[in-house]
Image (tube, helix red, strand yellow):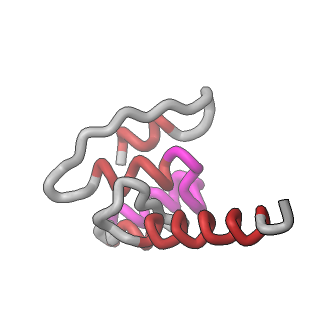
């Protein structure tokens, strides 16, 4: 279909809009700074060797830190940062 590329582009733009909207359940972050954590906590994350959130952290941390808190079910493979997500 010659219009498939335009349709895919449209879906990508919609998803990007949802990703940056803090009220969207699809909200995610690309940096720890976007989480607006206290400086001491942010420094601790960097001292532990983390430079940017993993894919599961990009999606889960904004949901876990939202106010009011939101229910969430997340699934990811071993070694992707799920345990660290709980420690933050």
> Which of the two residues, 84 or 27, is positioned nearer the viewer here?
27
Q: Residue furthest top?
A: 78
Q: Position of residue 83 (x, y in %)?
A: 45, 34
Direction from residue 70 to residue 46 in the image, left or right: right
Screen quadrant of the N terminus: bottom right
Q: Is residue 27 found left or right of 66 in the rendered image?
A: right
- In the rendered structure, the answer to whether residue 16 lies left or right of residue 66 reads right
Q: Residue at x 78, y 68 (%)?
A: 3
Name the residue at the right extreme: 2
Give how far across and how far down residue 82 sits, in percent.
48, 36
Say how many tags the image has: 0
- Residue at image location 40% in from the left, 65% down from the top: 42
Q: Residue at x 50, y 31 (%)?
A: 75
Q: Nearer the viewer, residue 71 or 77?
A: 71
**Displayed quadrant of residue 2:** bottom right
Residue at left offset 46%, top offset 51%: 59
Residue 33: image quadrant is bottom left
Whole-percent x and y of residue 20? 44, 71
Q: Is residue 59 left or right of residue 76?
A: left
Give 78 or 7, whichever is nearer the viewer.
7
**In terms of depth relative to the viewer, which is nearer, 73 or 1?**
1
Residue 67 found in image quarter: bottom left
Q: In the rendered structure, which segment of residues is drawn in magenta?
A: 40-56
Q: Is residue 48 magenta?
A: yes
Q: Position of residue 26 (x, y in %)?
A: 43, 56
Residue 61 forms part of the magenta stretch: no
């Amino acid at each position: 279909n010659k219009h498939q590329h335009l349709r895919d582009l449209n879906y990508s733009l919609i998803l990007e809009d949802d990703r940056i909207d803090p009220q969207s359940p699809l909200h995610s972050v690309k940096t720890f700074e976007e989480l607006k954590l206290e400086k001491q906590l942010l420094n601790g994350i960097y001292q532990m060797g983390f430079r940017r959130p993993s894919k599961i952290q990009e999606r889960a941390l904004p949901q876990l830190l939202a106010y009011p808190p939101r229910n969430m079910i997340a699934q990811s493979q071993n070694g992707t940062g799920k345990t660290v997500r709980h420690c933050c």
